[in-house]
Amino acid sequence: MEITRVEQRAYIKIDVLRERNAMECHSELVEALGNNALPYRTVARWIEKFQQGRVSTSDEQRTGRPVTVRTGSASAVIEQLMNYIKDL
């Protein structure tokens, strides 16, 4: 069974409510998930966020490259460019 990052964050959030520190929380995640557990530094960062009042366990929107790319239109443009270059 795979546990997602968001599910691990929910566990971290509960551990914050139980007043566990990063080391205790990370040790429990490693015990349950082994190599699939979040790294210690990530656990510590999320504990800090929840202690500062963060509520959501989901990723926030970020600027920059979109999550999805329209590969159909991008492929068509690239193909047209390649044909144009080839005809030069």
Image (cartoon, rainbow, N blue to C red):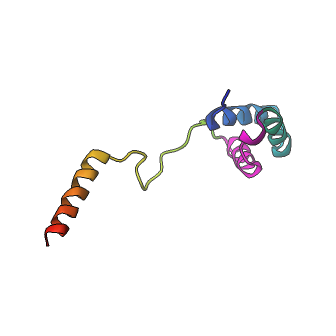
Rendered position, 25 above or below 69: above
Name the quadrant containing residue 65.
bottom left
User: Residue 24: where, in percent of width, then height?
Assistant: 86, 40
Q: Quadrant of the C terminus?
A: bottom left
The answer to whether 61 appears left or right of 85 in the picture is right
User: Over which residues does the magenta segment extend?
Assistant: 33-53
Q: Does 55 appear in magenta?
A: no
Percent of width and height locating residue 86? 18, 68
Magenta region's main secondary structure?
helix
The reply to whether the magenta stretch includes residue 48 is yes
Number of numbered tags placed on the structure image: 0
Q: Position of residue 9 (x, y in %)?
A: 67, 37
Residue located farthest toward the front when viewing the structure as drawn: 86
Comparing 62 with 77, the one in front is 77
Residue 41 lies, with reference to residue 25, above or below; the image says below
Tell me the quarter of the image containing the N terminus.
Answer: top right
Q: Is residue 79 visible?
A: yes
Residue at x-position 13% and y-position 68%: 87
Determine whether, in the image, residue 21 is placed left or right of residue 57: right
State the image quarter where residue 85 is shown.
bottom left
Residue depicted at 43% across the width and 56% down the height: 64
Residue 60 placed where, x, y %? 52, 44
